[in-house]
Image: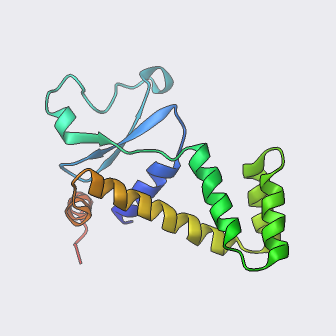
Amino acid sequence: MELMDKLIFSYSDNSFEHAYFLDLWTGEIILEMEESMTGEEPKIDWDDDESAERYIEIPKTDSNEGYRLMVDFARQIDNSKSRDFLFDALDRRRPFRRFKDAVIQLGIEDEWYKFEDAFFRQEIKDWIELKGLSYKELNEKFKAGRGEKSN
């Protein structure tokens, strides 16, 4: 599995009960949860001065961004009946659930998942660039930590 796939998973997991951190030294992604939830000590020692330089929190998507993404997807659908069906789903109660049901009913799941994946990839690339990091270097560290060879 590529580092990008793990970063996308971390970004799209929008639970606020935990956070994901990227280890800049190893490329590893670390899930941190409250000790009260896991009964375990945190994996990152924030009292260690090096931790602030070593780990950065991976941002999360939020429901506003998710809703805008569904609207953008619906807008680009050529078939007006399908497009209207998606917008109708978004205008109802529980729009996230209804939108996904509508996507399945229309048989356009693959298109939706590709659209969503492309958006998440770009968000992660923009975040990496904003942080002044090199994805290539991070991915090499990630693969080295897993005993994989870089291509």
| Above or below 27: residue 54 | above
Classify residue 142 as left or right of residue 104: left
- Relative placement, left or right, of 64 versus 133 is right
Q: Looking at the image, which residue sits at the far left?
A: 49
Q: Residue at x 73, y 79 (%)?
A: 78
x and y percentages locating residue 58 in the rendered image: 37, 45
Q: Where is the C terminus found, in terms of image quarters? A: bottom left
**In the drawing, does residue 92 fall left or right of residue 17?**
right
Q: Quick one: 94 or 32, which is closer to the camera?
A: 94
Given residues 9 and 144, the one toward you in this image is 9
Q: Position of residue 133 (x, y in %)?
A: 22, 56
Identify the residue shown where x is 78% and y is 45%. 94
Farthest-out residue, top = 36
Residue 57 pos. (x, y %):
34, 40
Depicted 8 relative to depicted 45: above or below: below
Q: Residue at x 26, y 62 (%)?
A: 135
**In the foreground, 14 or 75:** 75
Task: Look at 39% across and 57% down and name the residue there.
Answer: 124
Task: Indicate the quadrant containing the N terminus: top left, top right, bottom left or bottom right.
Answer: bottom left
**Location of residue 8 (image quadrant):** bottom left
Q: Could you tell whether 122 is left or right of 91 in the image?
A: left
